[in-house]
């Protein structure tokens, strides 16, 4: 039994609590510990558009939400802490693979973390997401629902990234896991903002969008993944069939768009995705730099379209 005074015990515990709740203090460090630049890179700002799209979907034309704190807090959470969870767990398990991946080390495709940085990453992920959801629960009053949402969110991401399941390396099972995971962002928007769930057309469109984006990303990572015998859907079926599958999902996305959404701008964008991919991958072929430029251009165009869709309320019930 510890017979030291209670004050001594509390003094000893204080540094441990402070360390557990600590965050990085510098923008760019020497790699010996996490810094904010690495954390932001891990969250993939180049792909924040996906979460913006998913979060805004059920809120279209609901202008009253724009003056509420919970709307903006939810969007902020979806952009950084949630993306840190989604991509951070992946980076924890792929540190050796990412070190040799020439696409890594930027704000589009993620950081090149050192083993020292990765060691502290799970704590940062848990801290920022638990605090983030607590803030949203305080703003919305949905404590139980958001707590359940967070448990499901951690479970799905763990199933995707962590053994014994680690579905990210057991293609094609990573595909339904990714679709279910990203659908949680739209569910979060409905929960936080007290609004109806998005209609069927959105869920069909979102499924096609997520699947073609996932396969296109896997295709970009084909060489390093194949080199270390990682079984994604892309390495499982090969480069040619990966490209065919992306085209099929792009075509399905266009079909869903034309069936559910009588909006010409949205329809044109869906067709442009097919044209650009076929031109880049199937006709002339491109190097990694050209692919990055093409995806950035499509992101910029997609971001513009998001606000049009929101203004028209195409994804809202």
Image (tube, grey):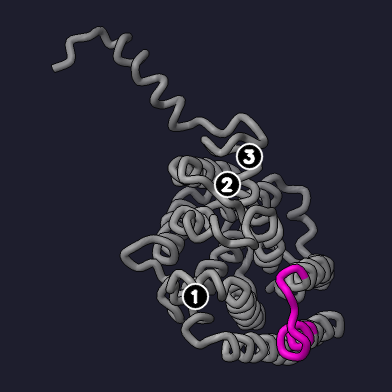
Between marks 3 and 2 in the image, the one whose residue lies nearer the viewer? 3
Between marks 3 and 1 in the image, the one whose residue lies nearer the viewer? 1
Q: How far is mark 1 from mark 2, CA to CA?
A: 41 Å
Q: Is residue 76 left or right of residue 227?
A: right
Q: In the image, residue 143 lies at what x, y percent?
A: 48, 48
Residue 107 circle label: none
- Determine if residue 136 is in view: yes
Q: In the image, residue 151 lies at what x, y percent?
A: 42, 56
Which element carries disc 2, helix, strand or loop? helix
- Determine if residue 260 is in view: no
Residue indicated by mark 1: 226
- Magenta residues, as a range? 276-289
Determine crowd level at label 3: few under 14, some 14-19, many 20+ residues with C-alpha closer than 10 A: some
Determine crowd level at label 2: few under 14, some 14-19, many 20+ residues with C-alpha closer than 10 A: many
Q: Is residue 283 magenta?
A: yes
| N-terminal label among 1 and 2 | 2
Which of 301 and 197 lies nearest the eye of the viewer? 301
Residue 136 circle label: 2
Please report the residue visible at 31 percent of the width from the left and 65 percent of the height from the top. Answer: 164
| N-terminal label among 3 and 1 | 3
């Amino acid at each position: 039994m510890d017979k030291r005074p209670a004050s001594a015990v509390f003094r000893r515990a204080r540094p441990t609590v402070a360390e557990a709740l600590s965050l990085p203090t510098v923008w760019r460090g020497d790699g010996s510990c996490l810094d904010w630049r690495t954390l932001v890179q891990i969250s993939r700002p180049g792909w924040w558009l996906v979460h913006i799209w998913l979060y805004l979907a059920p809120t279209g034309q609901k202008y009253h939400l724009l003056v509420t704190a919970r709307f903006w807090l939810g969007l902020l959470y979806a952009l950084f802490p949630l993306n840190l969870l989604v991509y951070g767990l992946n980076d924890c398990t792929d540190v050796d693979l990412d070190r040799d991946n020439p696409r890594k080390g930027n704000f589009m495709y993620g950081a090149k973390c050192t083993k020292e940085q990765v060691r502290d990453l799970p704590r940062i992920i848990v801290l920022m997401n638990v605090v983030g959801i607590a803030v949203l629960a305080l703003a919305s009053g949905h404590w139980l629902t958001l707590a359940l949402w967070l448990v499901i969110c951690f479970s799905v991401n763990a199933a995707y990234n962590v053994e014994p399941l680690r579905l990210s390396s057991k293609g094609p099972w990573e595909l339904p896991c990714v679709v279910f995971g990203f659908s949680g962002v739209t569910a979060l928007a409905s929960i936080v903002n007290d609004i109806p769930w998005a209609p069927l057309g959105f869920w069909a469109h979102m499924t096609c969008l997520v699947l073609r984006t996932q396969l296109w990303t896997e295709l970009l990572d084909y060489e390093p993944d194949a080199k270390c015998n990682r079984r994604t859907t892309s390495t499982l079926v090969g480069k040619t069939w990966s490209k065919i599958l992306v085209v099929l999902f792009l075509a399905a996305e266009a079909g869903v768009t034309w069936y559910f959404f009588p909006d010409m701008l949205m329809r044109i964008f869906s067709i442009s995705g097919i044209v650009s991919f076929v031109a880049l991958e199937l006709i002339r072929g491109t190097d990694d730099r050209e692919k990055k430029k093409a995806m950035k251009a499509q992101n910029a165009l997609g971001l513009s379209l998001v606000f049009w869709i929101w203004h028209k309320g195409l994804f809202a019930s």
